[in-house]
Amino acid sequence: MGAALPSAGRDGRAAAPIRPLDFAELKGWNSEDHGAALSAFRETCDLLADPAWQDIRNAAASAKDARRFFETFFRPVLVGSGTEALFTGYYEPELAGARARSDGFRAPIYRAPPDLPADAPWHTRREIEERDLLAGRGLEIAWLRDRVEAFFLQVQGSGRIKFGDGQTIRVGYAARNGHPYRSIGTEMIRRGLLPPEQISAQAIKAWLRRNPGQADDLMRHNPSFIFFRDLPDLRPEQGPLGAMGRPVTALRSIAVDPAHVPLGTPVWIETQGPEPLNRLMVAQDTGSAIRGPHRADIFFGTGEGAGQRAGRLRDHGRMILLLPAAAVGTILSGA
């Protein structure tokens, strides 16, 4: 797992052009907490199998000076023609739930059905729900309060569900039905249901609950459907599992498109919103809505506060990859 340099896609096209930068050109680099970034990088760096990462893996384990480590072994590069990056946020919800259906808990989340194909689309969200294709098969993991909570848990991909007896389970992404993700926020703008400046996760949830007669149809505009699995081995202080199979770290892990950004790569981000964020992250997760070399989803942590911050974020800025210095040198020399 892991690659030395980003590629333009899985279709065999040539790699996108890269433009190297100096660390001095990274806004806020000098005041960054490089030690915290190194801790997040260590979570997954042993999984980087490409030979270009071998010396980096070895050095990361024993590095005492985190800033020196990054500046010695990496080179910041902009990928592509300078297109602005778009940053959004995600989090791990904490939800009340039940082990069986009741009047207060009516919306199930499911394990993957055994007939779900591995390499072909299955039924759409609309077909699954309108035809009740999962009912009566013993696939329910838990029941949530309503379809809105279940829908947004699928959007986030992981969560903590607390039962009435005080026990809490962790659930994470297991599989999807093979259909592309479509943003219902974008569809709400198109239909004139909410103005663009009011779109956030919180505003969408509130609208869906105020308009139950339209809610199901709107959520079914997104044909993608996510299945979950239990994660009994995660400790309470750990984040949910990312795409690399390791826990992600709040405000240090991002979800990326691995067709363009190698998983495990350190990524410097500079956001331009009302709360600018200049920080060294690690690409340790993916998301069905995260596509292209200039997209990242920032993991904000667990709980309502993290959800509020994640739901408000939709900022442009710069996304700069830190790639192995030796490999960048080889590319630039044309070797």
Image (cartoon, helix red, strand yellow):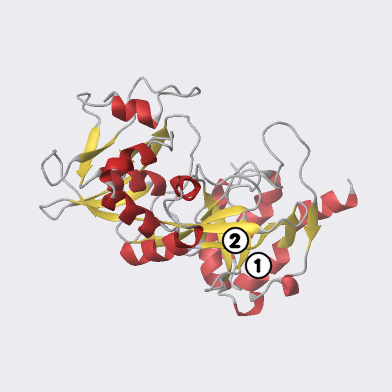
Residue for point 67% across, 57% down: 321
> Which residue is farthest top?
115
Residue 190: percent from left, percent from top: 50, 46
Residue 81: percent from left, percent from top: 78, 53
Secondary structure beneath dot 1 equals: helix
> Which residue is farthest front?
192
- The residue type indicated by label 1 comes to Phe
Q: Do the CB atoms of the residues marked 1 and 2 lie less than 8 Å apart?
A: yes
**Residue 164 visible, this orientation:** yes
- Give neighbour class at mark 1: few <14, some 14-19, many 20+ (Cα, 10 Å): some
- The residue type indicated by label 2 comes to Ala
Residue 113: percent from left, percent from top: 32, 25
Residue that carries the numbered disc 2 in the rendered image: 60
**Res 153 label:** none
Residue that carries the numbered disc 1 in the rendered image: 69
Residue for point 49% across, 22% down: 120
Whether residue 223 sits left or right of residue 52 in the image: it is left
* Quadrant showing the C terminus: top right
Residue for point 50% across, 35% down: 180
Which badge, 1 or 2, comes first in the chain's sequence?
2
